[in-house]
């Protein structure tokens, strides 16, 4: 009799920092220390990797800014180019809208 075991990636036993961060972000409450520790293990991105629309997710850490983002109905960010970034996208009338009160940004 031959027993076959499924081939599992080493990632199954020791997930990458990115996968660990995603898992951590799904917890209802996390500490800033947990997030920061894992965040600093993530690989850096190049500015051009950010181009596009990004959906946001508020991590519940009791930071005072969480309430501000929630009140603004924060959706995420939009990177049209590295020199034209809408750092705060909010939901208004069912659509993604740039929160112009905070202006635009650039990434380097």
Image: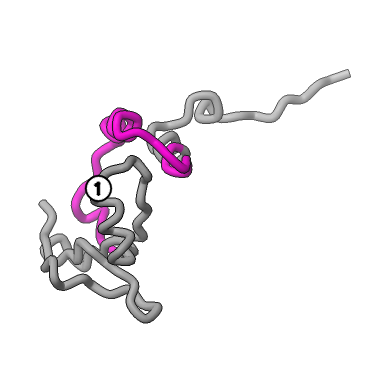
Q: Residue drawn at (27%, 67%), measured in percent from left and top?
A: 89
Q: Position of residue 50 (x, y in %)?
A: 26, 56
In the picture, the quarter occupied by the N terminus is top right
Q: Position of residue 7 (x, y in %)?
A: 64, 29
Task: List the single residue furthest toward the bottom.
Answer: 93
Q: According to the image, label 1 marks what residue?
A: 64
**Up/down of 71 relative to 107, above or below:** below
Residue segment shown in magenta: 24-52
Nearer the observer, 87 or 19: 87
Crowding near the residue tagged with mark 1, few <14, some 14–19, many ≥20 C-alpha atoms within 10 Å: few
Query: Residue 98 lies in what quarter of the image?
Result: bottom left
Q: Mark 1 falls on what kind of element?
A: loop
Q: Residue drawn at (31%, 61%), measured in percent from left and top?
A: 76
| 49 drawn magenta | yes
| 59 drawn magenta | no
Q: Position of residue 105 (x, y in %)?
A: 11, 62
């Amino acid at each position: 009799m031959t027993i076959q075991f499924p081939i599992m990636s080493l990632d199954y036993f020791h997930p990458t920092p990115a996968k660990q961060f995603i898992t951590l972000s799904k917890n209802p409450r996390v500490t800033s220390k947990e997030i920061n520790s894992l965040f600093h293990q993530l690989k850096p991105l190049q500015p051009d990797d950010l181009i596009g629309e990004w959906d946001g997710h508020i991590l519940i850490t009791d930071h005072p800014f969480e309430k501000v983002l929630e009140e603004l109905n924060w959706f995420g960010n939009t990177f049209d180019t590295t020199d034209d970034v809408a750092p705060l996208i909010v939901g208004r009338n069912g659509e993604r809208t740039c929160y112009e009160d905070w202006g635009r940004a650039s990434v380097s």
